[in-house]
């Protein structure tokens, strides 16, 4: 599947590439990442290969990431309308100012204007709330976003890093009030972060939100380059974002990724990306690249087809512990409600507590003395 085999994002008509180019690595302001020229080359290659979906945020490299995209559009004379540019609000760029971040109307309007200026564009295709703001009523946030849509400064809206119950509340408020609805959900999702399968992914499927996973390679942990053999010997640019997850469980998973990659004549990074792309609800995975080599390797994941045995082996090594009642529902709801039948292609075991025959069924009738 090439990059230009587009998919519609959630319950909308917005066509995006199946892999989204994340640009958090654009700019070296955080001590790691790509130079401006390297970033331009990565953008150029992604677009030449048919990609149209870019993801950034006002926070990324102190706003430099947005500025690099804006400069690229201006210098390379790329037609703005051919791209679906997504950016985010929420994070503050001004310490000491309580209204510089969050999801209030004041903060959203200011953040949007600043992002438009850095991106050198009149509109944002997809505007994300970067994280849930517990101090702002969700009605205020959704009303402000709806106003931006009606003003033509934003085309679509989505939520990132927000609890499922709050996403549902926001979506239902918007639908009942006729406001612009959410069309997408951006969440961390990878073989090392699967707890989203409990609430967030099912909610997205129910609410019509396309899922766009961030960090599908867990900051590079799932690329296969960090192994128990070279532990402590590899230079790690992202520090604790990577080292926190380098443990025996991760090494077992990386070993299996490398084994599967060898069987498929591929790479661990491609296998990890292909696994994420195949998960229910996933529309377009967000990947980052600091070099053209990384870009090409990641995009090649679209042509990789994992076999059922590969999914089984990777699933077993990465199985998450979900909050109650998800495991309970999964193991008990089928037998107790379906009781040995098949519904929508799913077959359940018989209910072990059901009577074995009609004669064992209690058919008692309450009577009232008159």
Image (cartoon, rainbow, N blue to C red):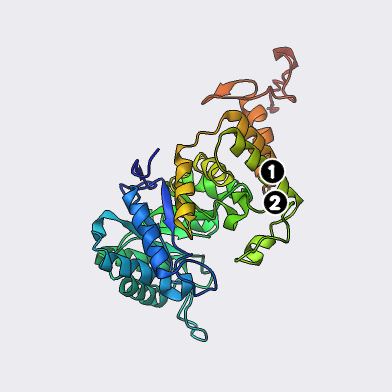
Helix, strand, or loop for circle 2? loop
> Residue at position x 37%, y 44% from top?
3
The total number of labels drawn is 2
- Between disc 2 and disc 1, whose residue precedes? 2
Above-or-below relation of 258 to 217: above
Q: Residues within 10 Å of mark 1 (few under 14, many from 20)?
A: some
Quarter holding residue 142: bottom left
Callout 1: SS? helix
Q: Which residue is mark 1?
A: 255
Q: Give the Cα separation between the discs numbered 2 and 1.
A: 8 Å
Q: Say if residue 128 shows up in the picture.
A: yes
With 225 as the anchor, is 140 left or right in this view? left
Residue 183 drawn at (x, y percent): 39, 52
Residue 101: x and y in percent read 47, 76
Q: Position of residue 230 (x, y in %)?
A: 72, 55
Depth check: give the residue in front, 324 or 1.
1
Q: Note whether residue 329 is visible.
A: no
In the picture, the disc for residue 227 is 2
Circle 2/circle 1 CB separation < 8 Å: yes
State the quadrant of the C terminus. top right
Residue 116 drawn at (x, y percent):
31, 71
Q: Is residue 81 above or below residue 36?
A: above
């Amino acid at each position: 599947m090439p990059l230009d085999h587009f998919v519609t994002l959630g319950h909308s008509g917005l066509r995006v590439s199946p892999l989204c180019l994340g640009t958090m690595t654009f700019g070296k302001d955080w001590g790691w990442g790509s130079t401006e020229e390297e970033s331009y080359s990565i953008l150029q290659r992604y677009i030449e290969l048919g990609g149209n979906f870019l993801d950034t945020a006002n926070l990324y490299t102190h706003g430099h990431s947005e500025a690099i995209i804006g400069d690229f559009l201006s210098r390379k004379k790329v037609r703005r309308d051919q791209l679906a540019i997504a950016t985010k609000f929420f994070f503050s760029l001004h310490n000491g100012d309580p209204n510089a971040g969050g999801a209030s109307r004041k903060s959203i309007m200011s953040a949007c204007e600043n992002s438009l200026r850095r991106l050198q564009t009149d509109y944002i295709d997809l505007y994300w709330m970067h994280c849930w703001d517990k101090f702002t009523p969700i009605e205020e946030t959704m009303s402000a976003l709806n106003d931006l849509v009606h003003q033509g400064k934003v085309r679509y809206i989505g939520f990132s890093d927000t609890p499922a119950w709050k996403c549902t509340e926001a979506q239902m408020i918007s639908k009942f009030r006729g406001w612009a609805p959410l069309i997408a959900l951006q969440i961390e999702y990878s073989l090392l972060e699967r707890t989203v399968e409990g609430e967030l992914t099912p909610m997205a499927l129910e609410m019509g939100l396309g899922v766009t996973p961030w960090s599908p390679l867990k900051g590079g942990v799932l690329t296969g380059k960090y192994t128990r053999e070279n532990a402590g010997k590899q230079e790690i640019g992202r520090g604790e974002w990577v080292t926190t997850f380098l443990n025996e469980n991760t090494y077992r998973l990386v070993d299996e990724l490398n084994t599967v990659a060898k069987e498929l004549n591929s790479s661990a990074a491609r296998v990890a990306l292909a696994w994420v792309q195949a998960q229910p609800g996933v529309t377009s995975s967000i990947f980052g690249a600091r070099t053209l080599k990384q870009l090409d390797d990641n995009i090649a994941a679209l042509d990789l087809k994992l076999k059922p045995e590969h999914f089984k082996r990777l699933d077993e090594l990465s199985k998450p512990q979900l909050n109650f009642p998800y495991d309970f529902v999964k193991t008990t709801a089928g037998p107790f409600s379906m009781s040995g039948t098949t519904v929508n292609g799913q077959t359940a075991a018989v209910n072990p507590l059901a009577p074995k025959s009609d004669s064992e069924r209690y058919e008692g009738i309450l009577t009232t003395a008159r």
